Amino acid sequence: LVLDFGTNLLQDAPGDMNLKLWTSRSIDIYYFYPIPLGESKFSFHPGIGLGYEKYSFSRNVTLTDADSTQIVEVDRSVYQTVNKTLLATNYIDIPLEFRFYTKEDYRGLMVAVGGKVGRRIGSYTKIKYEQAGASKTDKFSRDYNLNPWRYGLQARLGFRGIQLNGYYGLSELFEKGKGPVTNNIKVGLTIALF
């Protein structure tokens, strides 16, 4: 059972979709089943889990959900003091990894390469703002023409229960022709719980 913590980046995203680096976070929780490959130090690890991605915009923008998703400025007649805007997506993922351990029994330095495929199970935008001195939040759950599937390559490098991880999305974030052309890249830290 592992927890992945990461920071999201969007490759080739339009300027309106620039992200706040430290608040564009991801959390994944995966269970992997180890399958030894003979007597070697290599093993195959299929898994299943949930992935939660947040994309916090550096400008006060949000998404429209018309035929083609657009990035638009927040309506200032409704939201006068905006603190944060973001897009969140949630997935059921199936990760697959080939791992190499320098010691037997899955110990020592670990190197893993593989990929994952996921199905989106939810998405929403959020606008945090102030009105009459009180903090408020509006949340809009829609699909925003987001790609229902994601797939990409991932790698891990670490020792014992702590690893660095990286993911490069091969699928576009939005459906082809229905939104900005961009894909997800993330880097972060993995903590193996057991």
Image (cartoon, rainbow, N blue to C red):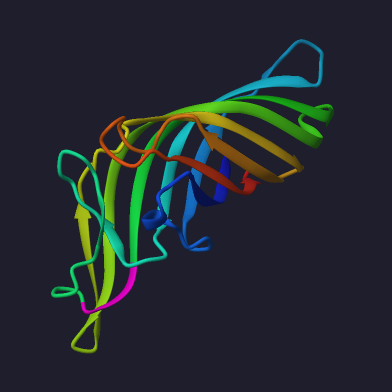
Q: Residue at x 48, y 41 (%)?
A: 184
Q: Is residue 175 left or right of residue 169?
A: left
Q: Residue at x 37, y 66 (%)?
A: 59
Where residue 27 sits: x, y (%)?
49, 49
Where residue 45 sits: x, y (%)?
61, 24
User: Is residue 72 a member of the stretch shown in magenta?
Assistant: no
Residue 95 shows in the view? no
Residue 55, image quadrant:
bottom left
Q: Residue at x 27, y 55 (%)?
A: 125
Q: Nearer the viewer, residue 46 or 171?
A: 171
Residue 151 shows in the view? yes
Q: Residue at x 68, y 37 (%)?
A: 156
Q: Quadrant of the N terminus?
A: top right
Q: Is residue 130 left or right of residue 105?
A: left
Q: Quadrant of the C terminus?
A: top right
Q: Is residue 183 left or right of residue 76?
A: right
User: Residue lying furthest bottom in this view?
Assistant: 133
Q: Is residue 153 left or right of residue 93?
A: right
User: With respect to residue 38, does 27 lie above or below?
Assistant: below
User: With respect to residue 102, does 40 lie above or below?
Assistant: above
Where residue 86 sits: x, y (%)?
34, 59
Q: Main secondary structure of the magenta part?
A: strand
Q: Nearer the viewer, residue 184 or 100?
A: 184
Residue 193, image quadrant:
top right
The span picked out in magenta is: 80-84
